[in-house]
Amino acid sequence: MVYIIKKMVKGEIYYYLNHSVRLDGKVKTLSHYLGKGPFTQYEIESLLKEKSQMILLEAEFLKIFSRKLNYKEHLLPLSFINILERLKEINRIMAPFNKSYFEKFEDNLRLRYVHGSTAIEGNTLSLRDAQLILEEDTPAGNTLREMYEILNYKELFKFMRSYTGDINLKLILKIHETLMKNIDDENAGALRNIDISISGTDYDPTPSPVIEDEINSLIDWYKGKKHFTPPVELACAFHQKFVEIHPFIDGNGRVSRELLNFILIKNNYPRLVIPFERRGVYLRCIDIGNTGDLIPFIIFISGLLIEDSFKPVATFFEQLKSKIIDENYSSEISLELDNTINDYKEILDIIKGMEGRIEKLNLSELRKGKWK
């Protein structure tokens, strides 16, 4: 609760804005000097309205920077995971200050996500074509299939916005049914009943008789891990395991990327876009994942989040720092923000270096771990 207190010093009235926040089990009171009174009731109410948002923001920052991660299972160092978590939270609390920008950015993420996810599977429509289909229902493309591959996401987004549950078989089938509508109605929303092979790989997907059991086991695994595993790692591992099962005749990649994003968004992360230009690295990371090594895929996905999905943090960083200085926040917050951004840039350089190595190595070298 934000409230104003008065202090009497040598017959003069001084006003302060206070707010209590719990950090590490202890209550800390934040206090900001408002000015020398007396103030009228109207002036007090105006100050309370004007200054409350910033002191609440200060409290949120202190919570972020004092938080200690307690994930029991993780593959990446906690210091790396901590940067992702910090960026996620900074991204979240900055949104109200730049509402219009964030709304447009999220719309753009959705558009690029649809374009990237379909382009990875061979759709030749341009980003502009995808935009016309999604926003204006304008037909585009060389085939009806290409158009419906884009258009079906419009219905999927509508459904996912209203969905309040968690991952289960019914949801997975619904996602597939929606994405394959008017493309393969016979198999839309149905697990495959034939065995298949994946071109370009030597990996054999799950035999058809045990697909449902494997999917249910994956869902049980997810439920058992979701409270103990960093969300990005959880999303990547689920995606990898789902692709290995390959439960559908067609559409497995699109469904797996939607489920990956479902896990991220459910944990307050922004949507992830895998652009067509990164398709090669993406598929190579999955190939490495087939050997049991998930680290390249997790690092790759983390890099996309840092580079793209968290772009608003970098965009408004200086503006945010200016607000902090103007409002006389503690130097601790400014220092922690600087450290976070520096770590953000350093990690991005490391990730780009890894991607470069992955692109240059052949599959045999990748599987031997020479990407490290």
Image: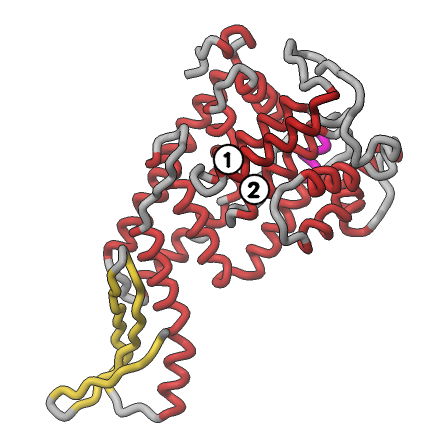
Separation of residues labelled 2 and 1 (CA atoms)? 8 Å
Asked whether 260 or 245 is in front, the reply is 245
Find disc 1 in the rendering and name its residue: 234
In percent of the image, x 81 and y 51: which residue is there? Answer: 136
Q: Is residue 110 above or below residue 184?
A: below
Q: How is the image coloured?
A: secondary structure
- Would residue 128 be visible to someone looking at this image? no
Marks 1 and 2: in contact by CB < 8 Å? Answer: yes
**Is residue 219 magenta-colored?**
no
72 lies left or right of 113: left
Quarter holding the N terminus is: bottom left
Q: Which mark is residue 224?
A: none
Residue 134 location in percent, x, y? Answer: 77, 47
144 lies left or right of 135: right
Residue 370 location in percent, x, y? Answer: 44, 11
In terms of sequence position, does the residue under pointer 2 or pointer 1 come before the other? 1
272 lies left or right of 138: left
For the residue labelled by badge 2, is the local secondary structure a helix, a strand or a loop? helix
What span is in magenta?
Answer: 114-119
Q: Quadrant of residue 173?
A: top right
Find disc 2 in the rendering and name its residue: 263
The amino acid type found where label 1 is placed reads Leu
Q: Quadrant of residue 57?
A: bottom left
